[in-house]
Image: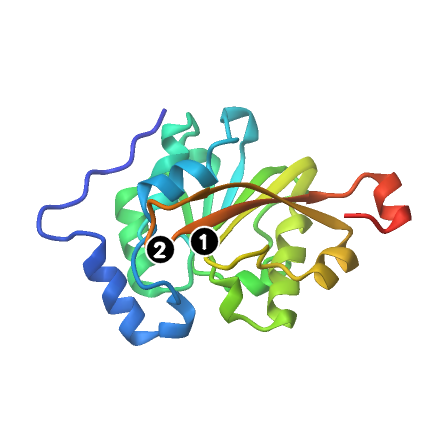
Amino acid sequence: MARCNDERPGTPDVVPFLRAWLAHPLRVSAIAPSSSALADLITRELTPSSAPVLELGAGTGVFTRALLKRGLSEEDLTVVELGADFVSILRERFPGARVLPVDASRLPQANLYDGSPVGAVVSGLPLLSMSPRKVMAIVAGAFFYMRPGGALYQFTYGPRCPVPRPILDRLGLKATRIGRTMLNVPPAAVYRITRRSPFHARSGRA
């Protein structure tokens, strides 16, 4: 298994995180880097059989590191991050991963994969701060590469799934909350989003 690089002394995650937040507060949205508790929760169901995995909005790589702890290799990961400072950090910490400065709302146009091999998408994107149109594009793009049985894992600080029900219905998806952690600032929940079964798609049930 590929290992991530250790953080360099004197450059904790909070420094580049705050720098990015000051430059693009709406893009970063959160008030602090994600905790290890949230990283453990959002990757809890993933194993090497989930490979390849697509990560969206990786930031400083907290979720990326958790994916490696689950047994995935760096070569299993395609990491999408638009922030230039974060891209540099991710490429240094995870040299075996494919780190791409791509807009997550334009995933199909980026030609990330040949076909739909992805077993899971892990998203650290701040969907609550985005327009419904952009959320729709991101979620549809994630499932564009998703193989049957795959899932999108999305965290939120809100009281319900950050992907609105009309978008789930339009894309034929369902959302299930898999857990919540209070050991994050602020507390966060994680949702697993999957395709509906043919029966549920016909009946309109979530």
Mark 1 crowd level (few <14, some 14–19, many ≥20, 10 Å Cα): many
Q: Which quadrant holds residue 38?
A: top left
Left or right position of 6 against 127: left
- Which label sits on residue 59? 2
Q: Secondary structure at mark 1?
A: loop
Q: Amino acid at mark 2?
A: Gly
Residue at x 60%, y 69% (from the top left corner): 134
Q: Which quadrant holds residue 70?
A: top left
* Distance Cα–Cα, label 2 vs label 1: 8 Å
**Residue toward you, 18 or 101:** 18
Residue at x 66%, y 64% (from the top left corner): 136
Residue 201, position as x, y percentages in the image: 85, 47
Against 6, residue 111 (above or below) is below
- Which label sits on residue 124? 1
Q: Secondary structure at mark 2?
A: loop
Q: Amino acid at mark 1?
A: Gly
Quadrant housing the N terminus: top left
Residue at x 46%, y 36% (from the top left corner): 43
Mark 2 crowd level (few <14, some 14–19, many ≥20, 10 Å Cα): many
